[in-house]
Image (cartoon, helix red, strand yellow):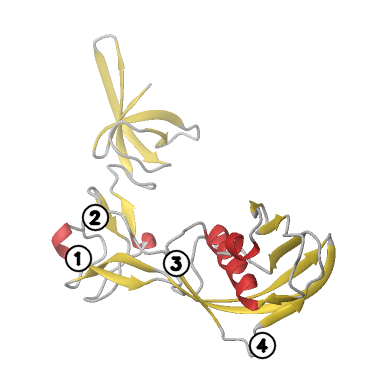
Amino acid sequence: MLAQLLTGTVALASGALFAGPMPERLERQLPMSTLQDAATAAIVEWLGTPDLRIEFASPRQRSAALAPAGPLTLRLRDLPNTRGLIPAHVQAAMEVRVGGKLIAVVPLAARIRAPRPVWVAVRYLRVGHAPQPDDFRAESLDVAGLPRQPWLATIPQRHRLLMSIKPGQMLSQEMLAPEVDVATGDVVTLQAQQDSITASHKALALQSGSTGDWLLVRPLGSTRPVTARVIAGGRLEAR
């Protein structure tokens, strides 16, 4: 790795910055492999996951730049916000600085592979279906470059599909939502108890939730919402 190649101390800091003292005698030719090792570490930190396979386009030259003696700093530029997704390709540039002075900017192209155990539907599943473990099979797929985040956890209970899934289609995070006992827009029964008298009337749910959750509801005919606790499907109890 980079630290072994440089035989010095290499520290990782924010912004994918790598810095540390170099040996007293530094080769004038900075190997491309040194930059690729630094870029690998920066990409792993950027994406926040260590189990990646990163391959770089083969450079024509073995040496990346001339590097005079002095403290070496390598910083990978141009890393965008991926919103939790893993890109399949990265086009970036490595800054090479010696003693704080910019010596070179070297373009780097990387291919990323991210094998993950994902869930694939074994049958057609309709929207609203409560998924069961036998609805899916586990497969190892490369998720780099996918437009959606796969569902990597176990198949959850009390969830519903927000869209239909075809056989062979991968389960993604946006396809599932927790099952609720009250959904926004439902007309529910709102109970209120005082002493030994219980009164009930209809209300409009302004939030979604499950049994035990506190939600905002608006009694029909009123403009003021109240807070009530879900006690069963379609039934809430006011404070």
Inter-mark Cα distance, 3 to 4: 25 Å
Image quarter of the C terminus: top left
Q: Is mark 2 in CB contact (under 8 Å) with mark 1?
A: yes
| Mark 3: few/some/many CA within 10 Å (<14, 14-19, 20+) | some
Inter-mark Cα distance, 2 to 3: 24 Å
Q: Type of residue at label 3?
A: Leu
Inter-mark Cα distance, 4 to 2: 49 Å
- The residue that mark 3 highlights is 52
Query: Which residue is found at the position 76% from the left and 65% from the top?
Result: 25
- The residue that mark 1 highlights is 136
Q: Is mark 2 in CB contact (under 8 Å) with mark 3?
A: no
Query: Which residue is found at the position 34% from the left and 66% from the top?
Result: 116
Q: Which mark is residue 155?
A: 2
Dividing the picture into quadrants, the one containing residue 144 is bottom left
Q: Camera-side residue: 203 or 99?
A: 99
Dividing the picture into quadrants, the one containing residue 175 is bottom left
| Mark 1: few/some/many CA within 10 Å (<14, 14-19, 20+) | many
Q: Which callout, 3 or 4, points at the residue further toward the start of the chain?
A: 3
- The residue that mark 4 highlights is 61
Q: Type of residue at label 4?
A: Gln
Q: Position of residue 14 (x, y in %)?
A: 66, 52
